[in-house]
């Protein structure tokens, strides 16, 4: 399926690029939180590999790719070193980082959905794991950094929705037996473009219907 779209070497390179960019986002958050170098490395690794690791454990693809491919492990460490020494410069190219992050989101939601289906999961479960592959690392990053996960916050541009759309397109293509290199590429591009548009126009998911409270989320009391 997705393997037919690229040669193994090209696909591997694209995955490493996505891992690198996801790791950058984790490392930058660690710097903002004033973590030490070990904390920066942990957040980089978790952000880059968390979603794929979760997917592989669920579908029984063990040992997970994160532990069988040294490049997967070393790439986040490279991002850690870059951010550790050059984080002011990396912050200045945040727009470029966000563009690559959006590309990684599109690629990983499609790759995750496809791999889950190839391991025997149903269409709905495959789409859910495609979403988890794309956003799972970011959720773990935010939890470890004591932040409300970005994809749960109303005041953040859409992130999970583009991944959901990409994953849903894949399972629909499978359902109607039209999944091909061309349609796989279409799903990747759709997720990528939707994320870019969400960042450009600040698209956000709606909150509860008829919500009248004007209290900001920071002031909301914690439930017991």
Image: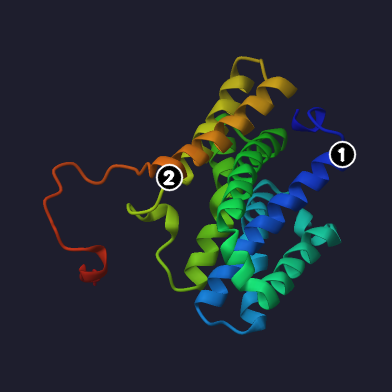
- Quarter of the rendering containing residue 137: bottom right
The residue to which callout 2 is attached is 158
- For the N terminus, give its image quadrant: top right
Q: Alpha-carbon distance for marks 1 and 2?
A: 31 Å
Q: Earlier in the sequence, mark 1 or mark 2?
A: 1
What residue did someone put label 1 on? 8
- Residue at left 54%, top 63%? 140
Question: Residue drawn 38% across and 45% down?
Answer: 202
Answer few, some or many: residues within 10 Å of disc 2's Cα (few below 14, many 20 plus, some between 14 and 19). Answer: many
Q: Position of residue 188 (x, y in %)?
A: 63, 33
Q: Give the quadrant of residue 11.
A: top right
Disc 2 element: loop
Front residue of 90 and 20: 90
Residue at 78% across / 59% down in the picture?
72
In contact (CB < 8 Å): disc 1 and disc 2: no
**Circle 1 — which element?**
helix
Which residue is located at x 56 percent, y 30 percent?
A: 190
Q: In the drawing, what numbered circle is on residue 209?
A: none
Residue 150 vs 109, above or below: the answer is below
Whether residue 180 is visible to the viewer of this picture, yes or no, is no
Pair 1/2: label in front: 2
Q: Residue 110 in the image: state x and y as whole percent.
A: 64, 36
Q: Is residue 54 left or right of residue 2?
A: left
Residue 112 visible somewhere in the drawing: yes
Q: Position of residue 213 (x, y in %)?
A: 13, 56
From the viewer's perspective, tell me whether residue 37 is left or right of residue 206: right
Q: 97 or 12, which lies in front?
A: 97
Viewport quadrant of the C terminus: bottom left
């Amino acid at each position: 399926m997705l393997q037919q779209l690229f040669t193994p070497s090209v696909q591997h390179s694209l995955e490493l690029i996505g891992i690198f960019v996801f790791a950058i986002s984790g490392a930058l958050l660690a710097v903002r939180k004033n973590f030490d170098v070990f904390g920066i490395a942990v957040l980089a690794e978790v952000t880059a590999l968390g979603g794929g690791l979760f997917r592989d454990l669920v579908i029984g693809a063990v040992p997970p790719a994160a532990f069988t491919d040294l490049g997967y492990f070393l790439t986040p460490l490279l991002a850690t070193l870059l951010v550790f020494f050059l984080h002011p410069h990396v912050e200045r190219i945040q727009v470029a980082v966000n563009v690559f992050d959006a590309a990684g989101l599109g690629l990983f939601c499609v790759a995750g959905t496809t791999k889950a289906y190839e391991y025997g999961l149903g269409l709905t479960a495959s789409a859910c794991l495609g979403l988890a592959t794309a956003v799972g690392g970011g959720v773990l990053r935010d939890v470890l950094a004591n932040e409300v996960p970005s994809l749960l916050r109303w005041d953040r541009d859409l992130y999970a929705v583009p991944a959901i759309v990409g994953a849903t397109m894949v399972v629909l293509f499978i359902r109607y037996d039209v999944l091909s290199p061309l349609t796989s590429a279409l799903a990747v591009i759709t997720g990528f473009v939707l994320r870019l548009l969400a960042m450009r126009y600040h698209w956000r998911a709606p909150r509860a219907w008829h919500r009248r409270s004007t209290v900001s989320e920071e002031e909301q009391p914690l439930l017991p």
